[in-house]
Image: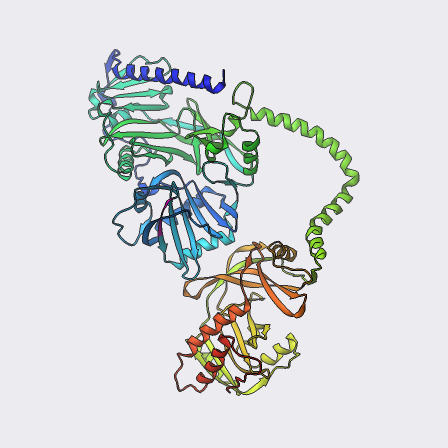
Amino acid sequence: MKLETVKTFILVILIGLSLLLTFGLWNYQPNYETQNQSSVINEVDIGGSGDETISTIVEPSEIIFHANNQHFGYSNPSDLLNMYQDMQSWEMSNFETSETEGRVEQNYEVEVIFPEDLPMEIVNQIFTFNEDIEEFPSWSFDRMYFTFDEETASLRVEFVSIDGRQQARAVINASDHYRQLWNTITSREELSAYVLFDEGESPIYIPEESKTMEQLSAVAISGVHPNNMVNALFPNPSLVSESNTSVTGSGESYYSDAQRGMTVEQFGSSMEYINPQSTGGTQSGTAVELLDRSILNINEHNGWTEDYKLTDLQSSAGHVGYRMYYLGYPVFNNADLAMIEQEWQNQALTKYTRPLFLLNDTLDSHSVELPSGNDVIYFLQNRLSPNYELGNIQDLELGYRMTVNRDYVSLEPTWYMKYNEGWYAIEDIAPSEGGFKMDWSKIKTLFIICFLILNAYLLFQFLNKQEQANLSVLEDSESPITDQLESENITLGDIGVDITEESYISTGQKTFTEQERDQLEGFDNQTSEVINNNLILSAFEDPVPIPDDASQEEINAIVEDEILLSENYVFGEWNTEKNVLLFFQVTNDLPVYLNQSGIVLIFLDDENNMQFYTQTMLGEVETQGEKRTLIEPMRAIETLYTRNQLFPDEEISNVNIGFYTRVPLENNEQVFAPTYKVAVNEGSDEQIERDYFVNAIEGTIFNSEESAFLNDTIGSIISSVRTLDDESEIKDPVLNVLESREENNRSEGENDNSF
């Protein structure tokens, strides 16, 4: 007979026995003693808190930061809670719903995962809206997403229905919230790498590396007196009597007023209240009304004796469940002593089960290291009992296994799996001859002994070859990409970079001071205008020549006496297509590449004489987080090669380090990433060069073309110059040149010497 058949047979017997015991419990008439009236407490307070609301009881199980197919989550549960509480205060607007065939994932997005399906009507209770929503859709969700709108520096919020066919969207128009979320996903100071398990019912993300948690061998507890619960649950406690005999002989006591009953089980550790007079009806009201009613009921007797969070909400059945959390991790117990559960019918409480103890001082604890997420996934894929199917796994969580004794509880950290709505400790479900139980402690001891013997032998063999092996490892680590480049005749020039650490920075556009504007008057050969106090436009009265073969040093020397604050700029490029010299602003001793808010553009005529220039400048810099270790330049080259950006017979002439941004924020503020600028010469013509920008921390490629940047920048300058008074003597000549360069229609030999 198959094990599953035996289990089914046993389950049927247990269900039948449960029904018989329930019927007997409701109709049981033992010998009663009238309860001592002096034991009844008028003010109901069982020792917990009584100020929970829907917004505080509903929390996500994970907040996952997705960055270019990498996944990150909070290392500390308290940081997750702080971020979620911040999210709750962010004002949402433009709420709308629609049908969808599936959402489109973004390179950078934040996913908030809740432990239970939530009705959309609850959104108004847990988040902030700056507008009245007349009606919320009837579907439920368990995940929401925050995505980044770079152009408006706003956050897009998406709620997706459980079946993936419906969605709701909203907007958060606040650059500070945008910046907060973006800084978190890019700096990752409080985050650690997570790994995706995609073989379950839905995507599950768990910490990639092993995690250290506190194992509490003994935590003192204090009990909740049953009389307190009698006073809280029975309408007339004076009519309640206590049975002197146990219903089942297993440490239970029974309380009843002849209509309602309350069983105190496991020597006072838990209770179950039954109100059969209210059963048999239908649940009235919405899911939010059900949850609000349940929270209010528990608040009335200060029933939140520990940190509890909503984990089950079934409005059709009138059922609400809350799980205990300790140090931010869920707590599990085979007898459900870590759960508060209620059932409501016709707006009356019909069933209430909960633990009757409070956790006090820790008597004994020590740190333990748990298996990594990769180890857990390997176990599930290779060692899981055949009675379990990967496709039915609903969640994976780090949590505490709670064992309850008379005077204390123990909390053992372990991995848990949610399977077909039930939670199981993963270490208990490995295959074994007699069942599911697998003693990991003994197995680990056996593995330790085996590997000690094996490693002793391997160490003896290894010592004589250690130096050669180390050299081999070094060669192997470098050879693959260099060999591949060599095989396609892709040569390397100067790719050395001195900097190995750098941080993200943020800054805004500088406003030129009155003193700086006065300094422009000191340039004798120029006529200048300052537009909006942040854009300098200056035309040369007598053209200044630039030699055709001028070096970078020679160009810097020519220009340094011709522009304001020239020590803050360095020559970057000579764009021959538009005949423009680009000077990048230097910040933290590094150039800022292709940024409209920190650049000097010098426009040349056909004879390479400087006609006029525009100048913008970035302001004071703020460091975003700690310095981060930069990837090697060769890694950046490898990224370009694997993304098919390098071709045979080309030369990587040089690699430089600077700052680059693709995140403009409101109020002219921007976040800059340390970035490698990789210059590539095409093999057919060494004069044709293209540049790539690679994030030096994350290794991602920034899509940027110099010609497109110049077109956008010239277009922006044209808009600014048009605001000048018509009396300005340089307005029209400058516009003539800019408009011809904007469309790139200047042919060879076309004369645009308008000065």
- Counting the numbered discs, the total is 0
Question: Between residues 151 and 96, which one lies in front from this camera angle?
Answer: 96
Q: Does residue 7 appear anywhere in the picture?
A: yes
- 624 relative to 360, above or below: below
Q: In this picture, is 310 found above or below 481?
A: above
Give me the residue at 59% from left, 82% from top.
608
Q: Residue at x 31, y 39 (%)?
A: 52
Q: How far from the left and from the top, in percent, is residue 123? A: 32, 45
Instruction: Determine which quarter of the picture holds residue 239.
Output: top left
Q: Quadrant location of residue 691?
A: bottom right
| Residue lying at the far right of the rendered structure | 464
Residue 254 percent across, percent down from the top left: 29, 18
Q: Relative to 545, is 400 above or below?
A: above
The reply to whether residue 90 is visible in this rendering is no
Q: Height in image: 149 above or below 533? A: above
Residue span colored magenta: 165-169
Residue at x 26%, y 52% (from the top left corner): 132
Seen at 67% across and 27% down, the residue is: 450
Magenta-colored segment: predominant secondary structure: strand
**Residue that sits furthest to the top in the current view:** 31
Q: Is residue 355 magenta?
A: no
**Where is residue 16 shown, x and y percent of the image?**
35, 16
Q: Nearer the viewer, residue 51 or 386?
A: 386
Judge by depth and name the residue closer to the eye, 81 or 473: 473
Q: Is residue 615 left or right of residue 323?
A: right
Query: x, y percentage for residue 599?
Result: 52, 72
